[in-house]
Amino acid sequence: MYTATTRDITVRVQPQFLAEQSDPATDQYFWLYSITIENGGDETVQLLNRHWIITNALGHVEEVQGPGVVGEQPILAPGESFEYTSGCPLKTPSGIMAGTYEMAAGDGPLFDIEIPAFSLDSPYQPRQMN
């Protein structure tokens, strides 16, 4: 489990390699990642946008930006959490993902919270530091 906390909002990530959706013979590897966002602060916040930086084992970087997560822009009151699962394909047997969520709280300025960097490892390559 990978964890980061920004402004009392904690993001936890658990990646999982999916062998049944991967095909090493054609350089297709697929991971699911489950994310929990927990509001430990004292104000209600809303997740507006996501920004991912995905780097494969060859150093190729892809950025993904857009509104919300899995079609939602969740609102989290103090003490509430939101969980979702999504996926990531790569053409290499390992990589790394990291990013930010853009958040809003009340009438204040928008702010980013950290999504912790997490490793995407498959059994088709020896584990290495990305």
Image (cartoon, rainbow, N blue to C red):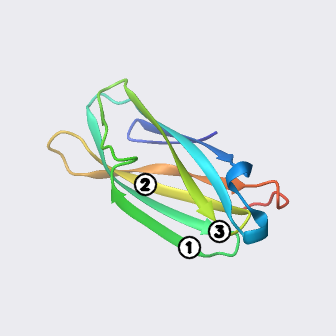
Q: Residue furthest left?
A: 107
Which mark, by number, is residue 108? none
Dot 1 falls on a residue whose secondary structure is: strand
Badge 2 local density, few (<14 within 10 Å), some, or many (20+)? some
Residue at x 65%, y 75% (from the top left corner): 59
Residue at x 55%, y 51% (from the top left corner): 87
* Nearer to the camera, 106 or 55: 55
State the image quarter where residue 80 is shown. Answer: top left
Name the side, left or right, on which 63 lies relative to 96.
Answer: left
Q: Does label 2 or label 1 sit earlier along the sequence? A: 1
Which mark, by number, is residue 56? 3
Give, as a three-letter code, the residue at label 2.
Answer: Thr
Question: Disc 3, disc 1: CB below 8 Å?
Answer: no
The answer for how far apart the CA atoms under marks 3 and 1 are is: 7 Å
Which residue is under mark 1? 61
Give, as a three-letter code, the residue at label 3.
Answer: Asn
Residue at x 58%, y 46% (from the top left corner): 33
Name the side, left or right, on which 82 lies relative to 53.
Answer: left
* Nearer to the camera, 112 or 32: 32
Question: Disc 2, disc 3: CB below 8 Å?
Answer: no
Name the side, left or right, on which 4 lies relative to 81.
Answer: right
Does 83 sit above or below residue 96?
A: above
Which residue is under mark 2? 100
Dividing the image into 4 quarters, which one contains the N terminus?
top right
State the image quarter where residue 56 is shown. Answer: bottom right
